[in-house]
Amino acid sequence: MRSLARLLSLLPLLAPALLVVSAAAQQAPAAQPRKLGQFQSWTAAVHTEAGHKICYAFSRASKAEGVVNRPANQVLLTVTHRPQGRDAVALRAGYAYPRNAEVKVQVGSNEFTFYTSGSDAHGRDGAAAVRAFRAGREVMARGPGPNNRGNASDSFALAGFAQAYEAISRECPAAAAPAPARR
């Protein structure tokens, strides 16, 4: 109780500082994504997050089946470059996956297992998925439907992926490897 009373007694002293912080937050423009280009089925873009440049390429599903009232244009496949990691591959399904679900992603003869979290599925080996995307024509993703009812399948065209990937790689180049220590 004393702590609360003490905190309340300090409020008049803190109020001006809180107003300054609040005004600055309202005046700071939100970092809007900037489109790097449209490459057939893929879009490349960049935005800033916590002061770091994030580059990503995405495509909307050309076909989304198995979930009622789920438009294909709300299902996204994304490849992202962040300062702490490259080639993060994710699929936004447009519905919440069941707990501990897996999604099978197929590109030609290559199959990848993605783990899920909420409405997203994430590739375990993004670099391998990107290599398959560069060489493939279509991505097929299959996973359990909402509440484990039925199955959902999504298709994504890979036309333009290589160009979109090159655009994000130019905008967010890989960090140079540290030089070996000299003796």
Image (cartoon, helix red, strand yellow):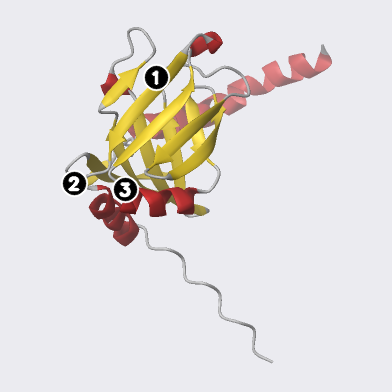
Compared to 38, does 172 lie above or below? below
Please tell me which of labels 3 and 1 falls first in the chain: 1
The image quadrant that residue 1 belongs to is top right
Q: Is residue 171 visible?
A: yes
Image coordinates of residue 177 in percent, x first then y, are 52, 72
Please tell me which of labels 2 and 1 falls first in the chain: 2
What distance separates the C-alpha of mark 2 from that of mark 3?
Answer: 15 Å
> Which residue position holds label 1?
94
Foreground mark, 3 or 1?
3
Mark 3 residue type: Gly
Left or right of residue 44, residue 180 in this image = right
Q: Secondary structure at mark 1?
A: loop
The image quadrant that residue 22 belongs to is top left
Q: Nearer the viewer, residue 101 or 20?
A: 101
Image coordinates of residue 64 in percent, x first then y, are 32, 21
Compared to 120, does 160 lie above or below? below
Quadrant containing the C terminus in the rendered view = bottom right
Foreground mark, 2 or 3?
3
Q: Are marks 2 and 3 in contact (CB under 8 Å)?
A: no
Q: Nearer the viewer, residue 37 or 16?
A: 37
- The numbered dot on residue 107 is none
What distance separates the C-alpha of mark 2 from that of mark 1?
Answer: 23 Å
Image coordinates of residue 94 in percent, x first then y, are 39, 19
Please tell me which of labels 2 and 3 falls first in the chain: 2
- The numbered dot on residue 39 is 2
Q: Residue at x 48, y 14 (%)?
A: 145
> Which residue position holds label 3?
136
